[in-house]
Amino acid sequence: MLGLRTLIRSAITSVPDVIHQQTRNTFILKRRNPIPLHKKGGRPSKMRGRHFVYDLVEDTNVRRQPDIKVILSQFVDGVGNKGDILNLRPIQAYRDYLMPGLAVYASPENLEKYKADDDKPKTEDTYSSPYVHRTIGCLSRTVLQITMNKFEPWVLEPWHITASFRKSGFVVPEYAIEMPPTQIKGPDLSLQDKEFYITVTINKKEKVNVRCRIYHWASGVDRLPWEESHWKKPKEPLFPEQAAELEKIPLPQ
């Protein structure tokens, strides 16, 4: 008997613990055979097996839930500013916004709260567009190569900068470009290994400094040698007053 008890005890303890996760499932059912009524004061009829047969009307787990509204509690890059209202699928709203604390439910109380915040002066973390923060990051890591003629005289103007941006995949209008305080003329081969920055204004509000370098172009034997991965190497500033700001602008990796 002792050996049997020991065997049973060891078999029980060797079974790993099973974790049962509670789930919420709602099924709407309809009784296939209705229960007959009984007279008032009389004894209810005994239920038969057929009375326990049900037909499935709806499984609420597969029902499409309506979108819910949330209010951003802070700026979210590529999404919106604080106080913006979003219509999202329930899973996306809960997983990507409510759980991380980036948004709150658009309840009447929260709507009144963020509506009152709209009347306050805008803070510095309020951007003119959801994509401004990302655009600033892309432009600040760009080394803009401005190709100029090696022999013909020229004066650097905003339209040269716009054309160079277009080659790099950015659309920057001339009115959004702030040139250096000193005029840059050429051809001048002393500009070849030096850099400066221009300032770009986004949506007439946010400003970002962009690192620029001039490359003197010529064809044939007059062509200057191409420096491999030149955008990763620091260069001497063209204007000493811009040196401190150029050190703050990150070089691309």
Image (tube, rainbow, N blue to C red):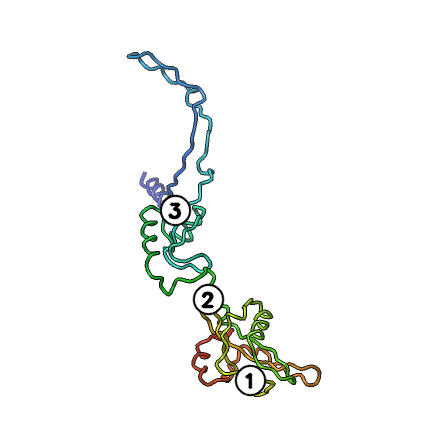
Label 1, secondary structure: give it: loop
Identify residue for label 1.
193
Please provide percent x and percent y for residue 59.
45, 34
- Please indicate, yes or no, whether residue 203 appears anywhere in the rendered image: yes
The quarter in which the N terminus is drawn is: top left
Mark closer to the chain start, 2 or 3:
3
Q: Earlier in the sequence, mark 1 or mark 2?
A: 1
Q: Residue furthest right?
A: 220
- Residue 37 is left or right of residue 140, and the answer is left
- How far apart are labels 3 and 1 at the CA level? 70 Å
Res 52 label: none
For discs 2 and 3, the disc positioned in front in the rendered view: 2
* Residue 244 coordinates in the image, percent (x, y): 43, 81
Viewer-nearest of labels 1 and 2? Answer: 2
Q: Which residue is mark 2?
A: 204
The mark nearer the N terminus, 3 or 1, is 3
Q: What is the crowding at mark 3: few (fewer than 14 residues within 10 Å), some, or many (at least 20)?
A: few
Residue at figure coordinates x 48%, y 66% from the top left: 202
For marks 1 and 2, give the CA distance.
32 Å
Return the residue at label 3. 16
| Amino acid on which disc 3 is placed | Pro
Residue 223: % across, % down: 67, 83
Q: Nearer the viewer, residue 248 or 10?
A: 248
Numbered-mark total: 3
Q: CA distance from mark 2 to mark 3?
A: 65 Å
Residue type, label 2: Lys
- Please, what is the three-letter code of the amino acid marked with disc 1? Asp
Q: From this viewpoint, is residue 100 visible? A: no
List x then y, in percent, for residue 199: 48, 74
Q: Nearer the viewer, residue 194 or 51?
A: 194
